[in-house]
Amino acid sequence: MTIKPPQSQDVPSGFDPGQQDPTIRFGVWGDNDVGPGVVGSSGRPAASGPDSVIETGTGVLGVNTAIQGIGVHGTCRRGTGISGTSSSGTGVSGFSPDGVGVHAAGDTGIVASGTRFAGQFTGNVGIGTATPSAALEIDRGRTNGVALRLASSGAAWGSGLQLRNTATGARTYGTFAGSDGRWHFTDVDAGVDRLVIDQNGRIGLGIGAGQAQRSLHVEGTEIHSGGSVGGLSFSDRTTGVFVESPTEGQRWVWYAQNGTARLWSGQDRLTVSTTGNGFALDVPRRMRVRQGGDPSAGIWFLQDTPNADRAFVGMADDTHVGFWGNTGAGWGLQMDTSTGDVAIRGSLTKGGGGFKIDHPLHPAEKYLSHSFVESPEMVNIYNGNVVTDDKGEATVVLPAFFEALNRDYCYQLTPVGDMAQAAVTRTVWDNSFAIRTDKPGVTVSWQVTGVRQDHWANAHRIIVEEAKPEGEQNRYLHPEPSGQPAARGVVLAPKGERTREGDGHAHTS
């Protein structure tokens, strides 16, 4: 680089630092109307040639030892107050231990160009404030102007901001406005978006470069809400405003408390629990189960064996509701929903039973009840009336299935309307039996009983007397009528919630 003196300028600028208010105290003053006020160059030829230089030294140096002076001051109406250029060093350097190192004022305070423009600051930097409390603080005062804008037409980080922690194991995160119109919050080290907000305000979490399909779209992770008011609140779609205290389901809240998940709308409408003796599912109103992809609708049950459905309660078809046993019973009980008729496939054990109807004489005011006839055997009863002939004989014809169905026959004969004697002269044979009276033309009321002997009855005989199993000793099917407390009942509560003997408090067994 050849160092030559600059061309001189002949026309003065008219600037007089002594006439400024306040007066400018200066070390070097150069006056020129159109060119640089002061030009300083430094360097000396190297031994290798006259045009080579060693770039050391100072072009312009201004020193002021006053307490509040200025080392170098440049003023220009429209040009550049101070210009410093260096190929590898520092263009302009200002140092003041107690004052201002470099002061720039004007429409454009400082213009810098190069591959790097860095300031090495040992303190805080303030823009709009003389007392910054952070490494960089921008104070726009009472204006609504933008404090900091990062602009770029690039796809990603040209308009971005990255936050880096240099500690071991720490990461770099950042945010930028992408050319796709979305606001990206990115794990820089992983190169993955963790949160994206699109131009419609939809928030996407964990969806990478994918598009959020709803106002909040979470992909591949879960949403967690905790704390004393944790929960998920959502409104009925037909409710146009937020309802603080809903009464008709205008707003709902899913929340958890004391180990129980609860669906709230004014009060808990549904709870799901895993604790203690509480109900796993509690619906404080009616619940509807509807037919889906199969012909029935209902609820499956299992007890101890995992993944082994044992029983089903629900609709057998559109007009029958019942109980299904999955280990062989099938539809053990069905009720016709149109007639109320009940069909039971197996045996029925009960404490008692009978019928209850509107009283035949006083149907509007009274009921009439009768008890079932009980027997230790499976007894069938057949009865009727027959009139003996001129010889006092008669044959009673029974159903064609009588002998196939019954055994161990018993007979009852009662003459009606006259004092007479009656006897069975031939027992059941070929589904009939014969009687005789000591007078002709006697009406006889007869009754025959038989014990069932069909295959089902033979396989399911009633055990008339049996010892109670060990777990039911000192317990009662009906404790209260026996003068015993309810805690001594055999069927007191589901498994896992029975009470200990002699104890009226529930314990988990």
Image (tube, rainbow, N blue to C red):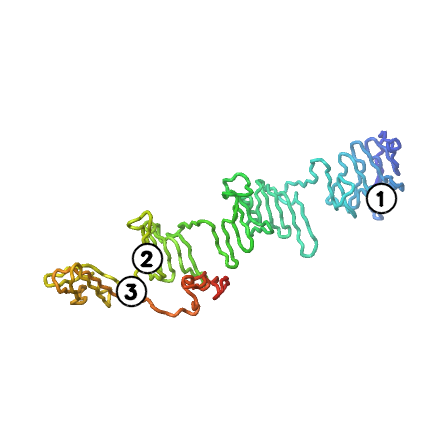
Q: Secondary structure at mark 3?
A: loop
Q: Is residue 474 left or right of residue 384?
A: right
The one nearer the camera, 278 or 362, is 362
Q: Residue at x 76, y 43 (%)?
A: 132
Q: Residues within 10 Å of mark 1 (few under 14, many from 20)?
A: few
Residue 210: image x %, image y %? Answer: 55, 47
Residue 354's tag is 2
Q: Quadrant of residue 60?
A: top right
Residue appearing at x 24%, y 65% in the figure: 450
Marks 2, 3: nearer the viewer: 2
Q: Earlier in the sequence, mark 2 or mark 3?
A: 2
Residue 437 drawn above or below residue 14: below
Frontmost residue, 120 versus 205: 205
**What residue is pinned by disc 3?**
378
| Disc 1: which residue | 98
Task: Tell me which amino acid carries mark 2.
Answer: Gly
Q: Earlier in the sequence, mark 2 or mark 1?
A: 1
Which quadrant: the N terminus? Answer: top right
Compute the Cα span from label 2 to label 3: 17 Å
Q: In x, y percent, where is residue 421?
A: 16, 65
Dot 1 amino acid type: Asp
- Residue 250 is marked as none
- Give the image location of residue 382, x and y in percent: 23, 61
Q: What distance separates the C-alpha of mark 2 from that of mark 1?
A: 110 Å
- Residue at 49% across / 43% down in the picture? 248
Total marks shown come to 3
Badge 2 element: strand
- Looking at the image, residue 72 sits to the left or right of residue 458; the answer is right
Q: Residues within 10 Å of mark 2 (few under 14, many from 20)?
A: few
* Residue in the foreground of this view, choosing between 308 and 31: 308
Q: Are marks 2 and 1 in contact (CB under 8 Å)?
A: no
